[in-house]
Image: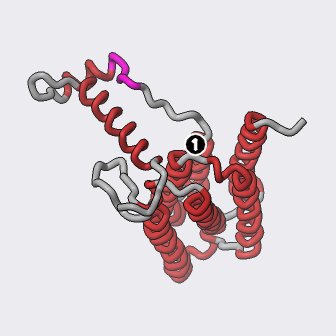
Amino acid sequence: MPPTPQDHSRVTRVVHSVTLFASNAVPMVGWFFQDWSPATTLVVYWSETVAALLFIYARGVLHQRWNPRRGHFRYAAPSGQGAQGSFISGFARTSFAFTAGHGFFIAVAVFVLSHNGYAGTLGLDWRAAGIGSVQVFAIVAADFLADLPYLRSWSFAQLEQTANRSFGRIGLMHFTLIFGMFGAAVTDSPSGLFSVFVTLKALYSLSTALPQWEPKTPPAWLSRAMNRLRPQPEGKRFEDIWVKDQHTEVARRKRNEQAWTGAH
């Protein structure tokens, strides 16, 4: 008997869970058990981000070709800015620009700190960084291959959600670069400080596997608190605005899911 779509979905979820755990295990094992330096660990994190973005872009290009939706060509963003251009092109421009900036930042930071007497603290091990980078690239590639047979049947919302998760990864990478590397280099306890960022990064990545909570109405306690903290105009309550925003979001998603015929 051939496998059912439910079987496919179950297998894919298992693969995603395994690759998610494995991609976080590589830098964590390196940092906590193999004496990787902050610089070595950051290089591996950066390589993982590059690999993830490349394969998300590949998903977007293939999905646009196999299952063209309006969101691919006239993307309606959550911000309410109206129809924009190609979703995947905009994603690529923004994400790769930030990631290239992060790579440049790492290179400059390593160069400057090394010349200021912190070479021993940084201790960039290119061999370990290279091996770790190859490992995470292979893991991310396996994650992509698990999606590939079913990519044609994805909704545009699935692609959008997958891409949006990467922005959180980029933001955390940015935060780690600013505070983690320099903090580890100039404090008396670099290992303890950088361990916090390694742990936070892993927890964030693992949290992306949890289902999103999108209630149609806000919790009662949140409504009461927001209505007290920020009084709304007469006749408008926080819960009313919440419901209106939910309806706007549903309409936006439906617009993006429309089949694309090439019409403007």
Q: Residue at x 74, y 57 (%)?
A: 145
> Which sits in the foreground, 149 or 2?
2
Taking the view exactly as shown, the residue that stands out farthest to the right is 1
Q: Position of residue 68 (x, y in %)?
A: 53, 57
Is residue 220 within the magenta segment? yes
Q: Amino acid at mark 1?
A: Thr
Left or right of 227: which side holds 12?
A: right
Q: Residue at x 33, y 17 (%)?
A: 221
Res 73 quadrant in image: bottom left
Q: Main secondary structure of the magenta part?
A: loop
Q: Residue at x 44, y 63 (%)?
A: 262
Relative to 126, residue 186 above or below = above
Stretch of the chain drawn in magenta = 216-221
Is residue 7 within the magenta segment? no
Q: Position of residue 193 (x, y in %)?
A: 54, 52
For disc 1, the marked residue is 208
> Which sits in the foreground, 199 or 163?
163
Few, some or many residues within 10 Å of mark 1 (<14, 14–19, 20+)? some
Residue 25 in sight here? no
